[in-house]
Amino acid sequence: KAGVTQTPRYLIKTRGQQVTLSCSPISGHRSVSWYQQTPGQGLQFLFEYFSETQRNKGNFPGRFSGRQFSNSRSEMNVSTLELGDSALYLCASSVKQGLGEKLFFGSGTQLSVL
Amino acid sequence: DAKTTQPTSMDCAEGRAANLPCNHSTISGNEYVYWYRQIHSQGPQYIIHGLKNNETNEMASLIITEDRKSSTLILPHATLRDTAVYYCIVRGHYDRGSTLGRLYFGRGTQLTVWP
């Protein structure tokens, strides 16, 4: 089975621009979540989608948004980019295992905002 | 979700067992203990999880104390490729309406395996 695929791998943008990141989950996984990782804040939860519905959202401004398509692929969008948005953005798809769950992460998109 | 406390860093000789501790004194009855690791420049990787019994898989063993307030991840024969940041996470079990995918990662333990 192919793993979680994120595109692009690297991205350079300037302040004020917007960006769209893409994530293809493992086949059959319906839950997709997004995380931001920075050296200062570590890994922080952005939002989670299940069957095209946003189920939960982390503490990020409204400039961060996402969506999920009927084939479970997901995109996240950041508008009006700021320097502080420079980070590794990670997508994960998850599957239940008994009453627990397993998350499978992609390799991430490294976003640099200049 | 309960908070966890882990040492900032540890090291281990290649071929020896690596024992990574985690304290989760506020864990509640329906919360699982999860371990993930992140090798530099990659996404986190699931290792193992458990509720109260010890668990073992092809990657590691998880030992949870009887009172469930702490646990230890054991890599039985550490290799250089096990050098990574290891995250101990406590999370409630999935049920209808709860959210898959939301995990609270702390700072983790940087494990360095040396030759």
Image (spheres, helix red, strand yellow):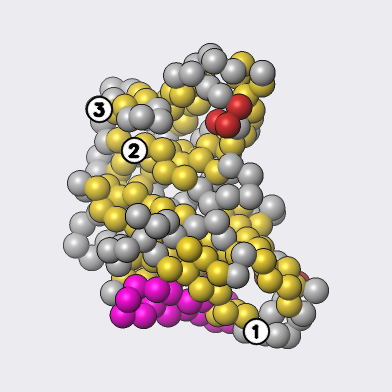
Residues shaded magenta: A57-76
Q: Secondary structure at mark 1?
A: loop
Query: Per the image, is A74 magenta?
Result: yes
Q: Residue at x 80, y 74 (%)?
A: A114
- Which residue occupies the extreme front position in the image? A1
Instruction: Determine if residue B10 is in view.
Output: no
The answer to whether B61 appears left or right of B77 in the picture is: left
The residue where tag 3 is placed is B53
Chain letter of mark 3 equals B
Q: Which mark is residue B49?
A: 2
Towards the viewer: B100 or B57: B57
Gap in angstroms between the C-alphas marked 1 and 2: 38 Å
The answer to whether A103 appears left or right of A44 in the picture is: left
Towards the viewer: A92 or B70: A92
Chain letter of mark 2 equals B
| Vertical placement of residue B77 versus A44, above or below | above
Gap in angstroms between the C-alphas marked 2 and 3: 10 Å
The residue where tag 1 is placed is A18
The three-letter code of the residue at mark 3 reads Asn
The three-letter code of the residue at mark 1 reads Gln
Chain letter of mark 1 equals A
Gap in angstroms between the C-alphas marked 1 and 3: 48 Å
